[in-house]
Amino acid sequence: MKLDGSTMKRTSEGDISATPDEGVDINPAGPKRSRWGWWLGGLAIVAVGAVAAVTLLSDGAGSDSANETVALTFDEVVQTDLIQMDSFDGTLGTDDGDPVTSPAQGTVTSTAAVGTMIEQGDVFLTVDNEPVVLLYGELPAYRDLTATEDSMSLGGNVSGVVTEVVAAGETIQQGDVLYRTDGEPVVVMYGDIPAYRTLRDLSDNMTGTDVLQLETALVDLGYDPDGLATVDEEFTDYTETMVERWQEDLGVEEDGQVSLGDVIFIPAEAEVLAVAVEVGQSVAPGQAIATISTGDALQGADLLQLEQALAALGYDPGTVDGAWDSSTKSAVVAWQTDNGVEADGAVNLGEVVFLPSMVQVNDVLVSIGSAVNAGTPVLGISSADKFVTFDLPAADQGLLAVGQEVVIEMPDGSDAAGTVLSVASVASGGQGEATFEVKIVLVDPSVAIGLDEAPVDVEVVSDSVSNVMAVPVSALVALAEGGYAVEVNTGSGTQLVAVEPGFYADGLVEVESSGLNVGDMVVVP
């Protein structure tokens, strides 16, 4: 039988015959047909099926034989995408990470239990009852994260008992009281020269740069309301008058002189990073009182990941740009307040551990009450991510790339999404077949909770076509003289329509034909 692009018809009487003008050569014994039936891996594409019955009557109107009824099953011609998948044997597991080390020196007062999943914002352990918190970030913590990278220590020049002291995290400006001893204030003024002597009016007038910065500060604070001061390096009667006005506002003795210890000069407005004394403590000249920020605002990648972590936890650090500002501080204070720790607005070294993602505690390496130093291993961890590894044959080396999506068939038969994390560039395998190790991360690790070293199948798209006309593979009819056709329902019978097969996937085959249309119904066994 040859089609030459023509059709054959199965009539309502059950005969297959050619239209006389189509020039179809018919084998008297009927068409020789065989159907292809094989299954190639791929994603299931379900065609809409239909079942119809066609009654085939025996030849001859007066035949004594019984009527013969043959039921034909039809399936629809579809327009679809076909995807071919290759399958590889893989192993599901986790990655052990480096142990978590204590970021601070002290005594371990608590740790997370084995098996605990630690997420961003959770506490790993406490050292001296101070929590060590996990935040997400690639860069390890290596410095205090606060207003500036530079700092300076402020020391006092008086003896006595501390009766008041500024708190860490506060901003100090010119004219503010830093602390009090025996009730007497020690005031901050701006200047680059440290106080080193008592400033007062002498008979021959005291002079010096320290006098100049005192007069500048007093004028800036408003103690020259009439603009009569000559701001120079000479302590005059009018300088003394400004000092007395300032002392009156402070509520101290108005003696017109600034004794050593009354004032501490700082370069500019600053944030108090730490306080070295507390109320009730006795202090002596030269003793450190507080540490303050100096210089430009802190910037850096570690600050950026802190801001990103705070934003992810629901705190607003303002513009997430890796530069410290008042919004960053406010977010830190809010986070510290919610966690019940000192809200000093700074994340000091030892308070957080940065890791890329959630982890699971596999081992506790210290006991409660153990003394630890910064760097002491305290917890064994593994990544909370779930990974699949498999060996990719060298012949398929170009099949996968980093970032590519794949399907993982889990041990229970369910499918999980995965993303290629790495493809080895160096082959292994020795004398055998060369392979390249592929590592895949599960998009949702929760689907693999409790599984480790489990066998899985990795399904990879190896080829595909888009928007093609397709029929079930079983609908193909192999013709004796070569070529293929499908048997199409015409409504009054069926007819063979020549097709050219193309891409195969998941029981469907791409076909090209001038006589076939999407929506036609074709015979399938």
Image: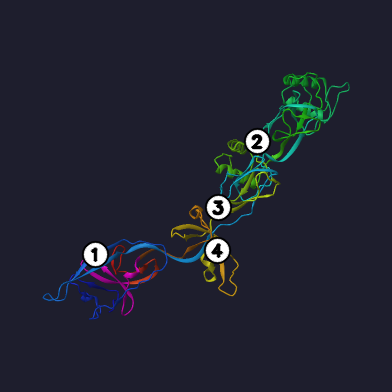
* Disc assigned to residue 52: 1
Q: Secondary structure at mark 2?
A: loop
**Secondary structure under badge 1?**
strand
**In the rendered image, which quarter is residue 28 located in?**
bottom left
Calculate the distance from the C-alpha at mark 1 to the C-alpha at mark 2. 80 Å
202 or 72, which lies in front?
Answer: 72
Task: Check contact, mark 4 vs mark 2: CB within 8 A.
Answer: no
Left or right relative to 495: residue 219 = right
Q: Which mark is residue 241?
A: none
> Measured from the top left, where is residue 223 in percent x and y?
74, 22
Q: Point out the image quarter for the C terminus.
A: bottom left
Q: Which residues are magenta?
A: 470-498
Q: Quadrant of residue 468?
A: bottom left
Q: Is residue 234 above or below residue 56?
A: above
Which label's residue is closer to the chain start, 1 or 2? 1
Q: Work out whether 471 lies above or below 285.
A: below
Alpha carbons under labels 4 and 3: distance apart: 19 Å
Q: Position of residue 382 (x, y in %)?
A: 59, 54
The residue labelled by disc 3 is 384
- What numbered label is drawn on residue 438? 4
Q: Residue 344: which numbered mark, if any?
A: 2
Where disc 4 sits, the SS reads strand
The kind of residue on which mark 2 rests is: Asp
Identify the mark nearer the N-term, 1 or 4: 1
Report crowding for label 4: few under 14, some 14 to 19, many 20 or more residues within 10 A (C-alpha). many
